[in-house]
Image (tube, helix red, strand yellow):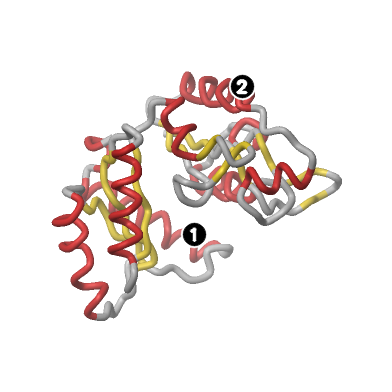
Amino acid sequence: AGYFKPVQSGCPEEKGRLIPTDALLARELAELPDPLELLTPIALRLPLAPGVAAAREGIKVDLERVVAAFRELASRYDFLVVEGAGGIYVPLVDNAFLVLDLARWLKLPLLVVARAGLGTINHTALTVLAARQAGLPVAGVILNRCSASPGLAEQTNPAVIEAITGVPILGRVPEIANLDEPEGRKNFLSAMIEICAQADIFKNL
């Protein structure tokens, strides 16, 4: 499986080069051979929505470059995980081309990653609704940063989300400390492997 994040904003600079840290982390965790410039072809400095950051930095998000990178990675892997930038209504180019528009361009099903606790029902249901209205299939929901000792909201949210949206909860990612350290990364990988094995996520995508 490969990884692709078309655009990342808020990238730090090292030696005169903007570093897409999400792609860097994914490459290290999954031991991917691909260059960062291919994994994330558009790197922006300002920590804003990509369309806003690009406009303020005087940069035009090159969608042809994004699609070319996607096709190259898709040719290298049997399965490609494409990470968005914020929610599906986040602008990528000016205020006219959104994350959901790119998903339609690339003909991708969505895997919605949502927080586990109080407030997630409304946000998750609205995301699923917006995706469906845009003609995007939603394969499932992953609940993120789940507590080891969940409160009542976190315990009841999954069943409510499934009932309202008709979309399955495919996994629950635990809260993992020290993700920047080897032990934290080891714990994260173990959790991901367990989730994929239990939910058979690939069957839904």
* Left or right: where 157 falls relative to 130: left
| Image: 152 above or below 18 | below
Q: Residue at x 51, y 39 (%)?
A: 98
Q: Residue at x 28, y 55 (%)?
A: 125
Q: Could you say where residue 110 lies in the image, as x and y percent from the top left? A: 35, 40
Judging from the image, what secondary structure is the residue with disc 2 in?
A: helix
Q: Could you say where residue 7 lies in the image, as x and y percent from the top left? A: 60, 40
> Few, some or many C-alpha atoms within 10 Å of disc 2 (few <14, some 14-19, many ≥20)?
few
Check disc 1 and report the residue beneath it: 185
Q: Could you say where residue 126 lies in the image, as x and y percent from the top left? A: 32, 53
| Image: 8 above or below 122 | above
Amino acid type indicated by mark 2 = Glu
Name the quadrant containing residue 88: top left
Judging from the image, what secondary structure is the residue with disc 1 in?
A: helix
Question: Which numbered disc flags the more N-terminal residue, 1 or 2?
Answer: 2
> Few, some or many C-alpha atoms within 10 Å of disc 1 (few <14, some 14-19, many ≥20)?
some
Give me the disc on residue 80.
Answer: none
Give me the disc on residue 64.
Answer: 2
Q: Quadrant of the N terminus?
A: top left
Q: Quadrant of the C terminus?
A: top left
Q: Nearer the viewer, residue 23 or 152?
A: 152
